[in-house]
Amino acid sequence: MPSQRRTPRGGPGGSTRPGMRPRPRAAAPRPAAPESASRRPRLTGRAAILVLVLAVLTVSYASSLRAYIQQRSHIGDLKQAIAEREASINELEREKQRWSDPAYVRAQARARFGYLMPGETGFQVLDENGRPLESQATLHDPGDVVKTVPTPWWSDAWDSVELAGNPPAPDSGPADKIDGTTQQAPGDRSR
């Protein structure tokens, strides 16, 4: 084997003199830190930039979130307006269907204009001042008519049994004398 030349440990280029041994470097003494003491984190430049970036993102997302919430509210208002208009359209369509019924048209002609069918005699009811009274009769949509549910016969029979077991208190008896000179309120039988 060829002989290898040893280079001194002084570093590259051999800065130590030949024949001299390099001195071992002494380690720098470390300050003794107690094991229980915790290190305080320092705010480094990177951490400051990270906090700044997070703050900017938070502000930008908060404004976007506010815009999103406003848009959702606006969409809800528009949906409510659409529902109201659809209900109005449905009501107008029902009115249109009523006007296609000849009986409804005749009833409206009678109510609004006082028209009569041939051979009928019209009467006008007047109040105490001689003005005509308004008619209170109105026609209803057949779909809106309240349907009464018939009571079963056993319910009527049971009510009769209960009435027989608990009769109502007797009213005051008939009047002994009838005096036609004084007026009494209806239902007042005290005399």
Image (cartoon, helix red, strand yellow):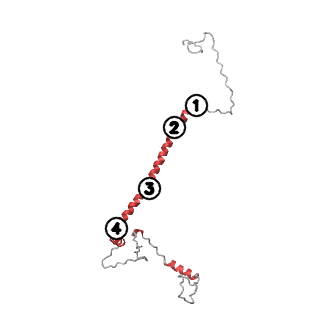
For marks 2 and 1 on the same chain, the one whose residue lies earlier in the sequence: 1
Q: Residues within 10 Å of mark 3 (few under 14, many from 20)?
A: few
What is the three-letter code of the residue carrying label 2?
Answer: Val
Q: Marks 1 and 4: CB-CB under 8 Å?
A: no
Label 2 – label 1 distance at C-alpha: 19 Å
Q: Residues within 10 Å of mark 4 (few under 14, many from 20)?
A: some
User: Depth-wise, is mark 3 or mark 1 nearer the camera?
Assistant: 3
Q: Name the residue under label 1.
A: 44
Q: In this view, does 172 lie above or below 141?
A: below
Secondary structure under badge 1? Answer: loop
Q: What is the x, y in percent for residue 160?
A: 53, 81
For the point 54% across and 35% down, which residue is it? Answer: 52
Q: Marks 3 and 4: CB-CB under 8 Å?
A: no
Residue 56's label in the rendered image is 2
The outermost residue toward the front is 129
User: Depth-wise, is mark 1 or mark 4 nearer the camera?
Assistant: 4
Q: Residues within 10 Å of mark 1 (few under 14, many from 20)?
A: few
* Placement of the N terminus among the 4 image quadrants: top right
Label 2 – label 3 distance at C-alpha: 37 Å
What is the three-letter code of the residue carrying label 3?
Answer: Gln
Q: Mark 3 points at which residue?
A: 80
Name which quarter of the figure residue 161 lies in. Answer: bottom right
Specify whether 64 is left or right of 36: left
Q: In this view, does 60 lie above or below 124?
A: above
What is the three-letter code of the residue carrying label 4?
Answer: Trp
Q: What is the x, y in percent for residue 47?
A: 56, 33
Q: Name the residue under label 4.
A: 99
Q: Nearer the viewer, residue 119 or 145?
A: 119
